[in-house]
Image: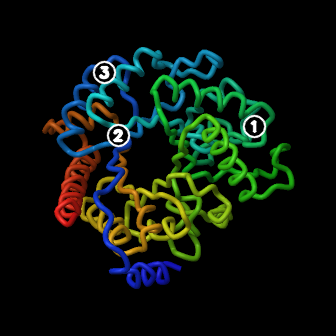
Amino acid sequence: MFGSVLLAVTLMQGARSPLPQMPIRGIHLSAPETSQIPIFTKFVRDAFPKEGVNTLVLEFDYRFKFQKHPEVADEGAYSVDQVRQIASACKDAHVRLIPQINLLGHQSWAEDTEKLLRAHPEFDETRGKYPKNKGIYCRSYCPNAPGIHKVIFDCIDELADACGADAFHCGMDEVFILADPDCPNCKGKTAAQCFIGEVKALHDHLKATGRQMWMWGDRFLDGRTNGLGEWEASTNGTWPTITEAPKDIVISDWHYEHAEPTPALFAINGFSVVASPWRNSSLAVQQVGLIEAIRKGANRQIANHAAGVLHTTWCDAIAFSKAYYGDKSQNRSVEETVQCFKDLFKAVRAAVAADEKKN
């Protein structure tokens, strides 16, 4: 499939005039500790305009003081006023703020289970199994559990309202536990049915509230046929649902080992897609090239879907900001993702400048 996608991009070279600029120039960060909001907001106002960042996906998860479901709020949760401080900084920096809660999968990490399943164990896809989460990567909530969407939708709405957000990132990457044979709610259902059912449920709710859905794209990729494996793609049968998913979802297409040509796959299938690198600068620059190739070579409908980039960091937001300003006390991974961010946005600025010169 990848060969045909690359061939399609090659054949489309020169078909139409190039589109100007790159609409989405984003970064994904975890929300800092509430005591560090002043440091973070200063970083947003100073660094983002300088680098050309216009989109911030900020992962809160359950660190928000939900009014309708206070039992789900994690320790160190943000108040509405604290969230608005970050939203204000983003507005000053002309940055679109998109909040995130990791949904479906990633409901635990190591021995720690996230607050949703601690407060509502009845939502656990594998309730009573895997004590202390041994033998699994991360827990999942059951998308078919009675009452799950009442809680999830309320949490999404409250956090998005506090952010003043017109979009919401639902996560949904690396979902390995799905349609468990011992789950009474999923009996007789396949992993594909459970996955696409949840994608559509979240999408439809967000659309009804006037918000755009974002998610990671790995579960829509065939990990076996294309050699992408079970992390950056799916090996449990969810990948065919790419044809069923609503096309107005924005896909964050993350790849950290190779500059896979999957942005073209998503764009051809009708999704807006952003390429998401992490800490390898040379690959990040190649991923910018993949987006640019589609934007410059494809017909206008496909080209429009190659929306830009979303840099991922996977480190503490304050550690990232310190390393950005030259603090050498941060670990190697932090330093690498900061350098990758700088190199990525240098390439993005060059691409945007070249587009503006032509237009």
Q: How many marks?
A: 3
User: For residue 357, which quarter of the picture?
Assistant: bottom left
**Residue corresponding to mark 1:** 127
Q: Residue, x 42% and y 68% (percent of image)?
A: 300
> Which type of secondary structure does the marked residue at label 2 adopt?
loop
Q: Position of residue 258 (x, y in %)?
A: 37, 68
- Of tags 1 and 3, which is closer to the observer? 3
**x and y percentages locating residue 253 in the rendered image:** 45, 58
Quarter occupied by the C terminus: bottom left
Residue at point 41%, 70% (across, down): 260
Q: Tell me the number on the disc at residue 36.
A: 3
Which amino acid, by three-letter code, is at mark 1? Arg
**Residue at x-position 47% and y-position 83%:** 3
Labels 3 and 2: the sequence-earlier one:
3
Disc nearer the start of the sequence (2/1) = 1
Dot 2, crowdedness within 10 Å: few (<14), some or many (≥20)?
some
In 3D space, how far apart are the residues under numbered discs 3 and 2 (Cα atoms)? 15 Å
Residue named by callout 2: 315
> What secondary structure is found at the residue carrying circle 3?
helix
User: Would you call the spot at circle 1 few (<14 residues within 10 Å), some (14-19), or many (20 or more)?
Assistant: some
Decide: is 82 above or below 264: above
Looking at the image, is mark 1 or mark 3 earlier in the sequence? 3
Label annotation for residue 174: none
- Place of residue 185 in the rendered image (x, y in percent of width and height, measured from the top left): 83, 43
Residue visible at 59% across and 32% down in the picture: 113
The answer to whether mark 3 and mark 2 are in CB contact below 8 A is no
